[in-house]
Image (cartoon, rainbow, N blue to C red):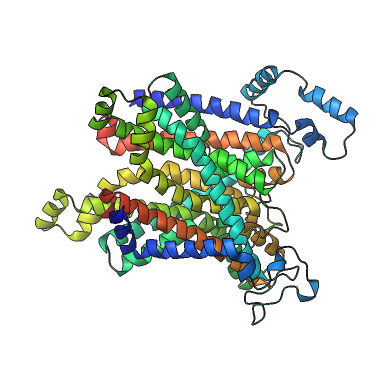
Amino acid sequence: MKFVLRALFRDWAAVFGLAVIFLLAVLAIFGEWIAPFPEDAFDVKPWQRLRPPGPEFLLGTDALGRDILSRIILGARVALGIALTVVAAAALIGVPLGLVAGYRDGWLSDAIMRVTDIFLAVPQLVLALAFAAVMAPSIQTAMLALTLTYWPFFTRIVYGETRRVRSALYIDALMAVGAGPARIALMHILPNIMPAIIVRATIGLGVTILIAAALGFLGMGATPPTPEWGLMVAESRRYLPDAWWYSTFPGIAILLAVLAFNLLGDGLRDAVDPRLRRSR
Amino acid sequence: MLGLILNRLAQVAFVLAGLTVLTFLLVRAVPTDPATILAGEGATAEQLATIRERYGFDRPLHEQFAAYVGQLARGDLGISVYTSRPVATDLVQRLPATVELALAALVLAIALGIPMGVLAATSYRRMADHLLRVLSMLGLAVASFWLAIMLQMTLSLNLGWFPLRGRIDTVAEPPPGVTGLFTIDYLLAGQPAMAWQALVHLALPAVTLALPAMATISRFVRSSLIETLQKDFVAYEIAMGYPRRVVIWKYALRNSLSATVTQIGLLVGLLLSGSIVVEAIFSWPGLGDYIYRAIITGDTNPVLSATLLIGVIYAVANILVDVIQALIDPRVRSGR
């Protein structure tokens, strides 16, 4: 663990990612106290609509006169909330399935992996859109659609890793002393494959923020007046090119958040897998 | 080789059958009543009953599924409520636009991504490598809908260099359909000016779509080339006095590409899902734009059929990857 952390902190990109994630977390938790106009999540102030960036509104105001900086800050909770919920739920579904499929042989294992293949047969955004399309658009629908389309990624990685660990000699030894399959899988295999799961989850957080924003942009996720970054970009399209700040800043927020999780994920993978360290 | 292809085809057939079940369950088993979606808001109970009977929503689920599969087998994908035409006709008509866009993006991504990867690998841990790493990380993290809007804002609306949307000007006459790819069809029809117009329309959507793919290619080429460059045969060739350029581009790169080719399936996925957002923004009349319009109008038939079609394209692409890999890597061909 100490070794992994030391390797991680030598990687400037991962440290940058970690710093941005820390900032996002602070904004997500304390957003109401940090945002200059916390009431702008819902308020409408038509007398100050579409003001360009200036001393009063650092990033300008939107078509309803709301401060964009405040809405970006308040949007951090929406983005992180969606991402954490989706990745946690997907891991809760995907990891046990992958463990079972990887540890056991036979029809159950085959069935799990074939179902996983079916879910992976279409790109995630396409499948999530299809799910979201048959339900009424809302953040909850989007989260459900994202969870239903993200768990197979966990199943596949856990399956592969479990197969790899299962053939180790110490597993044979455990079986010889009479440890049951549940005990071996949960207490001995799971801790060994945890790094792979954590790396996948970190990258998954970035992917989920990106796809959730795309769903919001396409009108299949958050609904107005939620301060959701993708939705903000969608709302801004009608006011181009004059209100350039309206589209630009929410998009930069998405870019930074996704970049941060990708950089940390890359750094973590290099830190836990020394084989890859040289080539990344 | 034939065995490999047959084996993969069987797997794909299974996956597609599963996808059919999944999309079917999606429409029929969700708690929302499909009849209410079809009838729209404010429909009377009588209208609902008529729709239920006409579409067979009142029959048991397995009977409905059998009917659905029967329809699919006949190539009947239902009617689109939005265009009021058969979905199959719409899909066939819109596929070439997406193919043209995706091909343009793929060519761009390969033409830029491979040299970028090579440059990064050969300047490993030096300035160019760091800059390219930042560039590719940005390419993967950027939301394509935002990038598309930024390009529209600066290059179309402010500078007027590129058209805002569409495949050609609205007043222009489409070319006689040969390949369905406008740039090529105009050239075949001897209209170079129109081919140029089509190309200019293609530029921004293709660049937007290409960026994540380019970043992916450059990352894979970089990491596999770095590994290859440490191999003994490279040291031997350099010691033999071969020019560095030849060693890298001819010998080392070819050995690294095999690992990159496996990622083409991933790229096709990126391009297909990116096309929904990109086509919707640039009003590019392809599959993605069709799915988008169907989604916002609550038109489920086109959404599910297009999802199935994308599954088919994705599966075919992955089989092609296996075949290409077998062709360039003899170890795969002989089953290792």
Q: Nearer the viewer, residue A22 or B44?
A: A22
Q: Give residue B325's position: percent from left, percent from top.
A: 33, 37
Q: Which residue lies furthest to the left in this view?
A: B240
Q: Give residue B75's position: percent from left, percent from top.
A: 64, 26
Q: Give residue A156's position: percent from left, percent from top.
A: 42, 36
Q: Name the residue rendered at 28%, 55% in the picture.
A: A3
State left or right for residue A134 relative to residue B45. left
Can residue A280 be seen here? no
Q: Quadrant of the C terminus of chain A?
A: bottom left
Q: Name the residue rendered at 55%, 57% in the picture.
A: B143
Q: Which of B86 and B310 is in front in this view?
A: B310
State left or right for residue B38 relative to residue B20. right
State left or right for residue B244 relative to residue A61. left
> Does A127 sit above or below residue B227?
above
Can residue A61 be seen here? yes
> Does B295 sit above or below residue B230?
above
Q: Looking at the rendering, which quadrant does residue A242 occupy?
A: bottom right
In this rendering, the count of numbered labels is 0
Q: Which residue lies furthest to the bottom in this view?
A: A55
Q: Nearer the viewer, residue B111 or B143?
A: B143
